[in-house]
Image: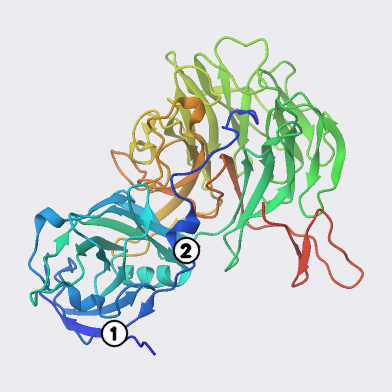
Amino acid sequence: MSVMRASAVVIAAVGALGCADEPRVFRADAGPRDAGMADRATPVDTGELPVVDAGVAVDRPPVQTTRDFVRPGTPTDAPARFDGAEDPAGAPSLVYPDNETIIPPNLPSFEIHFRPGSGNDLFEVSFAGAVTVARFYTRCVSVGGGCALTLNETDLTQVADAARGRGNVVVTVRGTRSPDASTEANPVGRSAPITLGVTRDSLRGAVYWWASSGSIVRYDMGTAGARAELFLRGDLINCVGCHALSRDGTRMWAGRGPIPGLVATPIIDVATRNALGTPFNASFGSFSPDNSRYLASDGVRLALLDGANGMPVPGLAGGTTGSMPDWSPDGTQAVFSRPQVTPPFGPTGHSGASDLMLIPWSGTAFGAATTLLRSTGINNYYPSFSPDNRWVIFNRANGGSSSNLNAQLWVTPSTGGEPIRLTRADGGDANGNSWPKWTPFVERTGGEVDEPLLWFTFTSRRDYGLRIQQQGRSPDERTSQLWMAAFRPTTRGGDPSTPAFWLPFQNIDQGNHIAQWVPSLQRQECGTGMMCGNNETCIGGRCIGAPP
């Protein structure tokens, strides 16, 4: 039976979319099942006291704990096989994640992608923190012309533990080859290191998104062992696509039909999925924080509706043009996009020069709209307020707002000021980064500099490391996936975002869009005399949806 011993190591301290926009069939270069996601690392007692340079600050204690984990199918003495001379020609290269990515500690899984060096068939993936190092030993699990190490929830706990104190770990991959007839240790190649941040706070909330199969899917970050579950079923004809959730997660409006806005649909109660009131036509919308009002748009003009039944109510000047509204969390105003030339129609978005507008809310009526960000010829669209009301994230692109590969991520202070491109989160040009949305909480980074941190998600048609390699494909052959990045609001004079990471609970074999976050899932209670509907199952007194 294998055991693990933590070794005390003395070290030197050193310094708007339609359902047919996605390909009908999409296969990633390798699916999650090929990555050994169910594999459990086997802890082993190496009996070693290796010297590890983990970049410990001079005021840190010079004692480091090393924990080794050996993957199934890997020699149990793997930690002892990395004593050979350094061989630069045999150095692996890290592909994913990008340097300085930040992740929360409670992801269901996370992957490291790398290309092996010459002759490598045995690897050590190291996560070195200030006082703890977690090392994983593995053969190459083949994916997209390279290798992947999949970390499950237990593994991520070890990585998060290593990140404590400093708030990050240094990730390095070393590669060697299996022993041959020679008695000498084989050469060892070492990758260039990257830094991976791990926050102190867990990611909170639940997320709903539209899958290109035509349905809405959801996932609860607050439940250990959760899985994605179907929420509203649709298909390519009766598509459930563009949707808006109330900030408390109790109500939703979701458009149906092959083109959003052409089919009248009602507001629904999320727990029961029961319709509330009268169906209405819309393409975009946002609930007031108290759910009393729903600010809707057909893509051209805004309308104010009762948040409980969808009926028109007074409080907004007739003929107010604009689309893609978002009500601020404090309820004092809404932001929306307004084309400088009013389009004849716009169920799936608009193109051309578009301004971002603010409109104040008194509690009973909207006042006159003012310009937050004036366009100089470019399209500014899909605005969204941050949970602290201080920022508006949005898309910017030349051309249309729907499925634009040139869409970029930008942010601007909600009080006005110069917009900032979120270059690190964008990850380059022509990635089709769209529909940015914040999570509902202000978190903390932890680490040596404990600061506020926000999370935001967006849809992207970029490569996912070695698993999805699609930059060479034509635009209509690329698939959209959900990505997340951190936002550091205290950043001064630069890009406050970090490189993004792929959200691991989505289906990699289909397009995923419009991730919207709420504090928690609303579920129907079940049990004696209370049955679940909507193809759900009663588990622990709550109705749980089927896998998507």
Camera sees residue 261: yes
The front one of 381 and 415 is 381
Residue lying farthest to the bottom in this orientation: 1
* Quarter of the rendering containing residue 375: top left
**Identity, as a three-letter code, of the amino acid under mark 1:** Ala
Q: From the top left corner, tell me how far across and down residue 117 is, in percent.
A: 19, 55
Q: Which residue is at a point 21% across and 69% down the rendered structure image?
A: 178
* Quarter of the rendering containing residue 160: bottom left
Q: Are marks 2 and 1 in contact (CB under 8 Å)?
A: no
**Identity, as a three-letter code, of the amino acid under mark 2:** Met
Residue lying farthest to the front in this orientation: 181
Residue 464: give its label: none
Q: Mark 1 points at which residue?
A: 6
Kindly state the secondary structure of the residue where label 1 is placed. Answer: loop
The front one of 529 and 312 is 529
**How far apart, in angstroms, are the residues tagged by discs 2 and 1?**
25 Å
